[in-house]
Amino acid sequence: MENEQKKPIKENILAAISSGRVTMRPRWHFVLRAVLLVLGVTLAALAVLYLGSFIAFSLRQTGVWLAPGFGSHGWFVFFRSLPWLLIGGAILFLVVLEVLVRRFSFAHREPLIYLTIGILAVAIAGSVFIIPLQRAAFRAARRDHMPFPGQFYLDFGAPHFLDIHRGTVMSRDGNQFVLQDPAGMQVTVLVASDTRMGPDDAGFGPGDTVVVFGHQEGSTVYAEGIRVDRW
Amino acid sequence: MEAVYWMNMAQEIAALADEEIVKRVQSGDAERFGVLVERYEPRLHRYAKKILLDGDEADDAVQESLIKAYVNIQSFDATRKFSSWVYRITHNECMNEIKRKRGKVTIALPDFDVLLPHLVADETSTDEVDRKQMRQELDGFLGTLDPKYREPLVLYYFEELEYQEIADVLEIPVSTVGVRLRRGREALGRAMQKNSTSL
């Protein structure tokens, strides 16, 4: 019964092929697709690495990464100061990267979690590895040697967050010192008896880079915590 | 003389592996694709019918699959298995048809079967003995099973594909094949139990 109703699939297909209604896509079509896929993966990976390293660099450059060490208020400031726009961009490119990588057959052989962890690990390790390049780019931008992305580095690389002040100690006098930020602005930092400092942080002096956590009023910062930035 | 020549040629082609025939088609011998259609049409039809549960829809899915296989045959890597590749195309056609029948766009949630690692639980020889009985049981209850579990069961028990081949067709890890087969059998058991209590 089933055989009687069965359509002549083979005849249909061969007739379509011989009449030219169905044609084989040329090999170059698939080679081009593969090249575009590899290109897409490469661009997405580079975007992830660039944004990831820039986020890590800007957190270090601004001292935000040390904020959690100053207690719950520090954590609050840390989350408030994160570059969410850049983080969103990095996550978007990570998703694009994962979607593209899943088009390769090897990506289906292992559980998806391995692929996700692998991509994240490479992204984080790669980002940390190329932070020195970001620092060099930032320095070039400050010396006005980067006409196009220079402003981008100055905008994101050295923003001034409330309650976090990173800069170089210009002079120290008892319970106060003068701090100059990367933009050249100077503030006076007052150190109180309850200002938190690590065991190795108390002996800082002129020339040291420090991160000061504390409220600013005018050109005076009331230090709640100080860390020497040995980066 | 000519009849003998064609007979020998036909025997030679029949003895060729799928992948060898694909190489010839890729080189421009398009007519040889008919041999592949002959070999795979019954198998793909049986598979599609058990997934779609409709003979006419299965016909359409198989015809479309084989046409797509021809159109994209230059993308096939002849060092791999043609059967997995062509089953994969048919799987996609069937899934598209099931989605079209459902008639609504659904958001694909993460599938934890594919996301997390599982231990591989290969079939034992005892399971092999039960294959025939399993096929009979499955035939009556396929419609009650979620396509996610129906497919590996059909590929394993009816199409007799290996775990690795099923993994290639469904593009899931081998360990997930084992998990889906086990859950599919459990779902089948529940459906049979429910049926027996309702009688």
Image: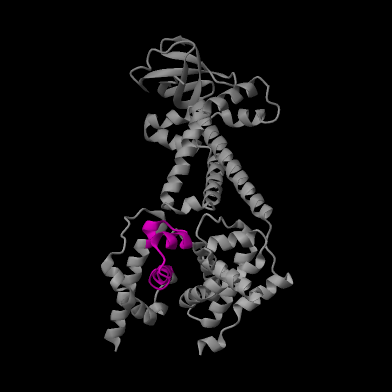
- Coloured how? one colour
Instruction: Give the quarter of the image for residue B174.
Output: bottom left
- Nearer to me, B62 or B113: B62
Helix, strand or loop: magenta stretch? helix
Is A29 on the left-hand or right-hand side of A211? right
Total label count? 0
Residue at the image position 66 percent from the left and 66 percent from the top: B30
A200 falls in the magenta region: no
The stretch in magenta equals B148-177
Is A186 on the left-hand or right-hand side of A14? left
Determine whether B6 is above or below A152 in the image: below
Evaluate whether residue B63 shows in this view.
yes
Residue at the image position 46 percent from the left and 21 percent from the top: A231
Evaluate whether residue B65 shows in this view.
no
The spot of residue B195 in percent (x, y) is: 31, 84
- Nearer to me, B69 or A206: B69
- Considering every residue shown, the one lying at the far front of the view is B1
- Nearer to me, A185 or B44: B44
The spot of residue B32 in percent (x, y) is: 62, 67
B149 falls in the magenta region: yes
Residue at the image position 65 percent from the left and 58 percent from the top: B27
